[in-house]
Image (cartoon, rainbow, N blue to C red):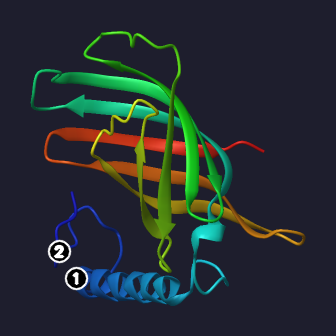
């Protein structure tokens, strides 16, 4: 236990409170300086920032409606770099295995300048989950041939009845 303003249990001399304030000030200065450094030299993201195949792990719950219960699944999505996507998924809802082994889907996405974005999709039978996925591009690297490449997307399904998150990893 640290007792501010006391020397109990501390061999140092001087005002412990002032030492703590000085150390805290130094830590805040370093953290503030680190926050001011841009995450990467790229000035903005766009649809072309998200391209290629991503393996996506899905987890969460449907919290309202007749299918309420846990959700787990996998998805493989191809982003074309122009705002189009195709995917196949296998999602178990409340312990029920889907009738189709891998359900195909098609859709669109858009990436904002701040590297967030949204995607929506439908299935070939015309069904749509009616959901929009928001994501943040993460884990990037610069390739001298292809420019900035992202290797992870973090996804949250935006709907009052769903509490679902997913992490996608780019397949190299």
Q: Is residue 126 above or below residue 28?
A: above
- Apparent side of residue 108 relative to residue 156 in the rendered image (left or right): right
For residue 17, what is the image quadrant? Answer: bottom left
Density class for disc 1 (Cα within 10 Å; few <14, some 14-19, many ≥20) is some
Which quadrant of the rendered structure holds the N terminus?
Answer: bottom left
- Apparent side of residue 60 relative to residue 80 in the rendered image (left or right): left
Q: Residue at x 25, y 16 (%)?
A: 94
Depth check: give the residue in front, 78 or 25: 78
- Apparent side of residue 82 relative to residue 31 in the rendered image (left or right): right
Indicate the secondary structure of the residue bearing disc 2. Answer: loop
Q: Which residue is mark 2?
A: 4
Q: What percent of the width, then of the height, locates residue 117?
A: 43, 65
Numbered circles on residues, count: 2
Q: Residue at x 15, y 24 (%)?
A: 68
Q: Is residue 3 above or below residue 44?
A: above
For residue 23, what is the image quadrant? Answer: bottom left
Depth check: give the residue in front, 4 or 79: 79
Depth check: give the residue in front, 100 or 31: 100
Q: Residue at x 24, y 30 (%)?
A: 61
Q: What percent of the width, then of the height, locates residue 112?
A: 47, 75
Give the farthest residue toward the left: 65
Density class for disc 2 (Cα within 10 Å; few <14, some 14-19, many ≥20) is few
Task: Give the Cα separation between the discs numbered 2 and 1.
Answer: 5 Å
Q: Say if mark 2 contacts mark 1, CB within 8 Å.
A: yes
Give the farthest residue toward the front: 125
Q: What percent of the width, then of the height, locates residue 129?
A: 30, 39
Q: Which residue is mark 1?
A: 17
Which quadrant of the rendered structure holds the C terminus?
Answer: top right
Q: Is residue 65 above or below residue 172?
A: above
Indicate the secondary structure of the residue bearing disc 1. Answer: helix
Depth check: give the residue in front, 3 or 114: 114
Give whichever of discs 2 and 1 has the lower sequence position: 2
């Amino acid at each position: 236990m640290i007792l501010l303003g006391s020397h109990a249990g501390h061999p140092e001399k001087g005002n412990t409170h002032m030492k703590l304030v000085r150390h805290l000030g130094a830590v805040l200065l370093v953290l503030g300086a680190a926050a001011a450094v841009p995450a990467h030299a790229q000035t903005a993201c766009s649809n072309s920032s998200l391209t290629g195949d991503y393996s996506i792990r899905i987890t969460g719950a449907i919290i309202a409606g007749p299918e309420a219960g846990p959700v787990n699944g996998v998805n493989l999505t191809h982003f074309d770099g122009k705002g189009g996507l195709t995917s196949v998924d296998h999602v178990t809802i409340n312990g029920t295995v889907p009738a189709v082994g891998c359900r195909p889907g098609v859709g669109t996405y858009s990436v904002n300048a701040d590297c967030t974005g949204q995607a929506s999709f439908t299935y070939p039978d015309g069904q749509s989950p009616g959901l929009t996925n928001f994501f943040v591009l993460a884990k990037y690297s610069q390739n001298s041939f292809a420019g900035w490449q992202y290797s992870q997307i973090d996804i949250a399904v935006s709907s009052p009845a769903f509490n679902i998150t997913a992490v996608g990893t780019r397949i190299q």
